[in-house]
Amino acid sequence: MNTDYCFNLAMRKSSRLITQFYEDRLKAVDLKVGQFSILRAVFFKKETTNKALQDILVLDQTTLTRNLKPLFRDGYLQTSVDDNDSRLKNISLTEAGKALYEQALPIWQQAQQEIVEKLGEPQAGQVHELADKFVKVLK
Amino acid sequence: MNTDYCFNLAMRKSSRLITQFYEDRLKAVDLKVGQFSILRAVFFKKETTNKALQDILVLDQTTLTRNLKPLFRDGYLQTSVDDNDSRLKNISLTEAGKALYEQALPIWQQAQQEIVEKLGEPQAGQVHELADKFVKVLK
DNA sequence: ATATAATACATGCATATACATATGTAAAGA
DNA sequence: TCTTTACATATGTATATGCATGTATTATAT
């Protein structure tokens, strides 16, 4: 183990590279990767909150708030104040949001497949184990 | 292998977490992680260029140009136009830059050690292998 | 020798990131 | 009740990120 090799730079470099890879493919549906992640998370949750999304995406509350903005602005997400707790804003996909997600899905799946092929094993399998470990020890 | 687990989100989550970890420690010397990476790279190269740093840091030219700005502004880096090619700006550490890097180094080393302990093996060792692989197949 | 292509770096724009802090709402305690 | 505490979200500020594009300089081709 060479401790001259910065763990942080290693992860940031990798993150930048894979982000560019997905970004490039998602251009076809005019989505940024962060926006796709949000749409995907909201799609699975049906209805969720800023708070819940923070956990899933490991994003700061203030960052998430801002990342949501373009999606509201472009009509892909909608909010309604929670019936029981008016502090909560429930977030869900609009019809346009669902349509966009369905459109982006095969592009994302193709990107996933290409990453598996490019990384090969054992690296491809290690990505998720490593991410889980990072979340476990640093979050 | 669960391909429902987005590789990109996995890497971005991890990158955000480890960045916050290093960021927190480097606050003691008022440096952002990206700035530390630049200082460290310039320290090893003695004299370098925007172009060379792009390769080391895996950063877009325009991003790097901007990330350099605060370091010039605060007097940690200096430039001189290359003798042979006036398009090139040679970048080097000022005395203040060297002093700051020396001050940051033990903090960074401590952070590195803590990451090794937190991640444990085999994960800690995999970080760099994985980063090398990402650079190899995506750059 | 001059036009063209390639290279190095900078700027406009939009989003990404998070800390400090502010605002508004709900829950808990006196 | 009403005051304090906790919680959910938003805003101010600064840096991070990269695409499209612009400017200046060097190298190449005819």
Image (cartoon, coloured by chain):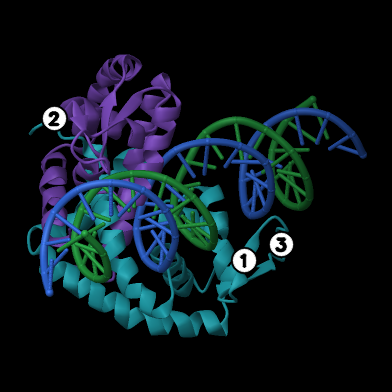
Chain colours: A cyan, B purple, C green, D blue
Query: Is the residue B4 above or below the residue C23 in the image?
Result: below
Tell me residue B5's x, y (percent): 28, 66
Crowdedness near tag 3: few (<14), some (14–19) or many (≥20) residues, C-alpha within 10 Å: few
Q: In the figure, is residue A52 to the left or right of B69?
A: right
Q: Is residue A61 shown above or below B124? A: below
Direction from residue B32 to residue B88 in the image, left or right: left
Tell which of A124 and B71 is nearer to you: B71
Q: Residues within 10 Å of mark 2 (few under 14, many from 20)?
A: few
Residue that numbered label 1 is attached to: A90
Kind of residue at badge 2: Thr
Whole-percent x, y for residue B50 in the image? 27, 41
The percent position of residue C22, horizontal first and vertical second, equals 74, 38
Q: How far is disc 1 from disc 2 in space, using C-alphas? A: 45 Å
Q: How many marks?
A: 3
Of the pair A126 and B106, the residue shown nearer to us: B106
Residue at screen point 40% across, 84% down? A103
Residue A84 placement: quadrant: bottom right
Q: Is residue D27 above or below residue B104?
A: below
The amino acid at mark 1 is: Asn
Between the residue at mark 3 and the residue at mark 2, the CA separation in whole angstroms equals 52 Å
| Disc 3 residue type (three-letter) | Asn
Residue A133 drawn at (x, y percent): 25, 46
Q: Which of marks 3 and 1 is nearer the N terminus?
A: 3
Q: Select label 3 or label 2 by which is in front.
A: 2
Q: Do labels 1 and 2 share a chain?
A: yes
Residue found at x 19% / y 46% = B55
Q: Name the residue under label 3.
A: A84
Q: Nearer the viewer, mark 1 or mark 2?
A: 2
Look at 48% across and 85% down and name the residue there.
Answer: A99
Q: Name the residue under label 2.
A: A3
Q: Residues within 10 Å of mark 1 (few under 14, many from 20)?
A: some
